[in-house]
Amino acid sequence: MNIAPLLEIEQLHAGVAGKEILRGLDLQIYPGEIHALMGPNGSGKSTLSNVLMGHPAYEVTHGTIRFLGRNLLELPPEERARAGLFLAFQYPVAIPGVTVARFMKAAVEAVRGREQVRAAALLHEMRETARWLEMEESFLNRAINEGFSGGEKKRMEIFQMLLLRPRLIVLDETDSGLDVDALKIVARGVHRALGPDTGVLLITHYERILNHIPPHKVHILLEGRIVKSGGPELVAEIERRGYDWLRESAAATS
């Protein structure tokens, strides 16, 4: 039986403020797979995550993105989230005056359907999830990310992920600035969310998170294109050789 990809990107060209950043990106992610996307600063990694979630500042000029068989580019950001796409931000923003519990109730009702959500059961789920992430229950009554440490902000992203139960998880350098203990908790959350029908796109600069979340496939993004894909062994090669050898190889074949 043929299994359809969760995410299928073909010849994606996109940019911001008139500057093209992605220049023909191709990628497929199937259910149950963890894909790591690596590359130097300015290669287009965060541009891809913003395009996937429909950030209005980013313009797609060519190519297609299909998510669960649907044309993702036709959907506004809220519909993409409702369809099962989740992005954990590198720099989560604070939302003063809105508590975590209130925000998550609205978000879960929007994704699951209000008629499917019982307030008492959801509050119990929030408490259990917070406890599992080693967060104090008082966290639920705090304003979103206001006064949170870097590690707390990243746990807040994972907290949302676990409650929203997405089909495709995009982690945009979620490991940035985390200490070892916080990194392990983030990794546990990803493993808990990953199932046979779920996929992960893990955008990172660093090998260390991939030691906790081993990828099935690794892709190297340079100048807006994926120039090499492979298994986990590719990470060690990048650590040893850097990206220059791939630049030279890409230039020779272009």
Image: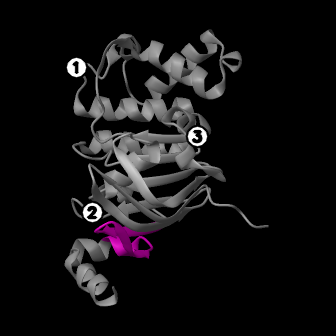
Give the structural element (helix, strand or loop) at label 2: loop
Task: Residue under label 3, please give it.
Answer: 84
Q: Earlier in the sequence, mark 1 or mark 3?
A: 3
Q: Which residues are magenta?
A: 217-235
Q: Nearer the viewer, residue 21 or 216?
A: 21
Q: What label does residue 43 carry, if any?
A: 2
Give the structural element (helix, strand or loop) at label 1: loop
Q: Nearer the viewer, residue 45 or 190?
A: 45
Residue 194 left/right relative to 55 = right
Of helix, strand and loop, which mostly describes the magenta segment? strand
Who's the residue at 60% across and 56% down the image?
Answer: 32
Residue 52 left/right relative to 183 = right
Task: Residue under label 1, please give it.
Answer: 147
Q: Nearer the viewer, residue 121 or 67?
A: 67
User: Which mark is in front, 1 or 2?
Assistant: 2
Who's the residue at 33% across and 85% down the image?
Answer: 254
Q: What label does residue 14 carry, if any?
A: none
Look at the numbered discs 1 and 3 and tell me whether their residues touch, using CB distance below 8 Å: no
Q: Quadrant of residue 54?
A: top left
